[in-house]
Image: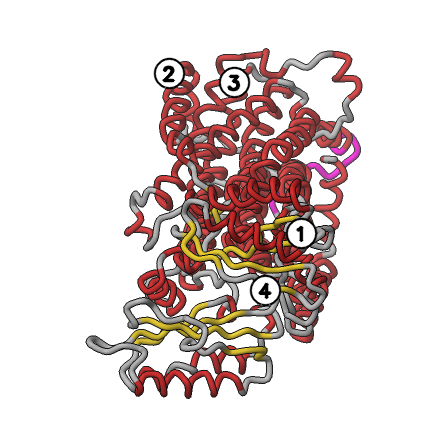
Amino acid sequence: MATFLYKLGRLAFRRRHFVALIWVALLTLAGVGAASAPAPGTTSFSIPGTEAQKAFDLLEQRFPGASADGGTGRIVFKAPEGEKMTDADNKAIVAKTTKELSDGSEVVSVTDPFTTNAVSKDGTVAYTSVKYDVPGMELADTTREALEAAGDDARAAGLTVDIGGDALQAGAEPGAAGEIVGLALAAVVLVITLGSLVAAGLPLLTAIIGVGIGVSTITALANALDLGDTTSTLALMIGLAVGIDYALFIVSRYRGELADGRDREEAAGRATGTAGSAVVFAGLTVVIALAGLAVVNVPMLTKMGLAAAGTVVVAVLIALTMIPALLGYAGRTIRPAGEKRKPRKKKSEKSENAEKPRAAAKAGLGTRWAHFVIRRPAAVLLLGVVGLGAIAVPVTQLELGLPDEGSQPTSTTQRRAYDLLSEGFGPGFNGPLMIVVDAEKSADPKAAVATVTDGIKDLKDVVTVTPAAFNKAGDTATITVIPNSKPSSTQTEDLVHAIRDEGAGIKADTGAEVLVTGTTAMNIDFSQKLNDALIPYLGLVVGLAFLLLIVVFRSILVPLKAALGFLLSVLAALGAVVAVFQWGWLGGLLGVEETGPIMSMMPIFMVGVVFGLAMDYEVFLVTRMREAYVHGETPAEAIVTGFRHSSRVVAAAAVIMMAVFGGFITSSEQMIKMIGFGLAIAVFFDAFVVRMAIVPAVLALLGKKAWWLPKWLDRALPNVDVEGEGLKALDSRNSDSDPDNDRELVRA
């Protein structure tokens, strides 16, 4: 592989105009496609194989035209101090509001709170429900604007008016200011690491181009493939981080090759052949982890994972082709590693210095740290494992759920509407349960439904059970149940399970099937499905990556150590997420206004994304150690060599990733904020504790055993040549066949 990538890098360097033109054309094509694509349609959320989804599908079949998936809106009114909503003036204002809403083109129905018993017992709070004939995310802007403006007259009359419901969902918007700050910090780190503005600009430029192609393609296909805004956000987040990192590793290796006296085209080829090989395998681990989300069998997660994986593939291809091309354009503006800008020297003096290999530099921080770890490996290993283990303790109290309007910032009208409904009707009113009774096989459907209703009324934590509503055929009914607890509480989850247990007995007695659905039940089923899929997913992803790393490192223990280190870092990161978002520690500092259950997809999502990123650092750091060991150094010397060449770049890459992910913490969306924080802290733990401390400590303790591989397996494995042995052989052939050995080696 190293030889192939070496040739690819040299070709891209020589044909830089052609390579740059291809990528600019692809970016333009993707941009035009995104601009001309139809607006995204419905972003349906389905969970195949769950009871809640089965009930939803049954409603679509038995209640045709009822717009079961249609958007909903709620306008919540609160009377001024000393007044009630039932006062004549206030009733008139509400009537005027409902009349204006009824005139909307996409509106199916608007309820009158005074005829539907939608007024609180004390008379101070009332609400109007609006039903639309299309899903909330598919509503026209004019319809959403009409809903938002519906309460203006009521507010002018002195009422408190807030609006909730999925009709107001406009997608998850990342914090733009945070992204800019993250990129600015990444630029500063790149300048410090690479030594010049031009060198620092290359990774930023290629990452932006890669993300532009990836996100524009997602936007262009959003309508056809039913892709949501969160898909683009994830692709943007991952694409920026890996795009910058992969380019950074190749540019850094290029400067090192220049410092070893190679000419610029040769240095570009060598950098692509060596660091590029690591980029390929690091990218493969990320792609495996993201594409593996398909095993969960949740369409939304599958699409998110595949879209982000596609963006990573683009980042790898750009790093292998566009970076060498841009290095050709940069010429002498990118200087060899360790060289500082000096007064111009005479050509003869310059040529004489160029032919000398780089002198041994003063030991840097990475080298000194590697020597320290080698002297005290047991102490470093113990401290790292115990420290991360302590941070992971909160995972034992992990509670899973999905964010609702109660997790929105208090500055939003959705959150205020949620709080008003809780105040007027109880916390469970924001998460009603819909019971669907399929009595098609029952001898007496009405009697079966009555049995269901009576049984639910006797259950604990039930406040209200509405009368059953039958379809035209009379074989299916819906019942609405209002719990006593908020939607995300464990009491509400227990109630859902209790209703389902009750339904099992009713089916045996009457033949009627009882199904529980609604947003709350959907969330519960989704969380359970993710929990059930976590172990198989972990086994698949870690297993495939383990096999891949055996091929890369030609070792059994190194990949095993890599996988165990990842598990430790991801558990510690999840522990930090629980402490902040569930317990509220440092919540004020991070803008967490409401604590509650952790987003149910967070564990499996972090396993996928963090595993891929963790293997990036493992590949980049340990391949350099493997390279040194293969070339004759002792295990201890190889550890020091790996740190001398890679630790600074790996640390810079980690800081850049943390900056990019940290930018999303400023988002107003709880889900995006949680993902940004979780990924940023996971990168910190994995890069600086696991890879920089635990990994060298384990390798120092294992010595030569770390690189042990059974002979039969060594013969069976393909030789991918990540260490660049083929390039070393190429050196010998070139030196024998090239008569012009006195040419200037470092040239533009």
| 3D distance between C-alphas at marks 1 and 4 | 19 Å
Q: Foreground mark, 3 or 1?
A: 1
The secondary structure making up most of the magenta span is loop
The residue pinned by badge 4 equals 469
- Give the distance between the C-alpha atoms of the residues marked 2 and 1, in whole angstroms: 55 Å
| Residue 383 appearing in the image | yes
Q: Nearer the viewer, residue 582 or 702?
A: 582
Q: Earlier in the sequence, mark 3 or mark 4?
A: 4
Label pair 2/3, CB-CB below 8 angstroms: no
Mark 4 or mark 2, earlier in chain: 2
Q: Which residue is mark 3?
A: 699
Q: Residues within 10 Å of mark 4 (few under 14, many from 20)?
A: some
* In front: label 3 or label 4: 4
Residue sitting at x 40%, y 24%: 384
Question: SS of the residue at dot 3?
Answer: helix
Apparent side of residue 471 relative to residue 638 in the rendered image (left or right):
right
Which tag, 3 or 1, sits closer to the chain's start? 1
Q: Are marks 3 and 4 in contact (CB under 8 Å)?
A: no
Residue 183 seen in the current view: no
The residue tagged 2 is 379
Amino acid tagged 3: Leu
Question: Counting residues from the N terminus, which is met first, the one under dot 1 or under dot 4?
Answer: 1
Q: Nearer the viewer, mark 2 or mark 1?
A: 1
Q: Nearer the viewer, residue 487 or 236?
A: 487
Residue segment shown in magenta: 734-746
As drawn, the label of residue 54 is 1
Q: Residue 389 at what x, y percent from top left? A: 40, 26
- Which is in the foreground here, disc 4 or disc 2? 4
Q: Tell me which residue sits at (73%, 39%) in the image.
A: 740
Q: Is residue 730 left or right of residue 274?
A: right
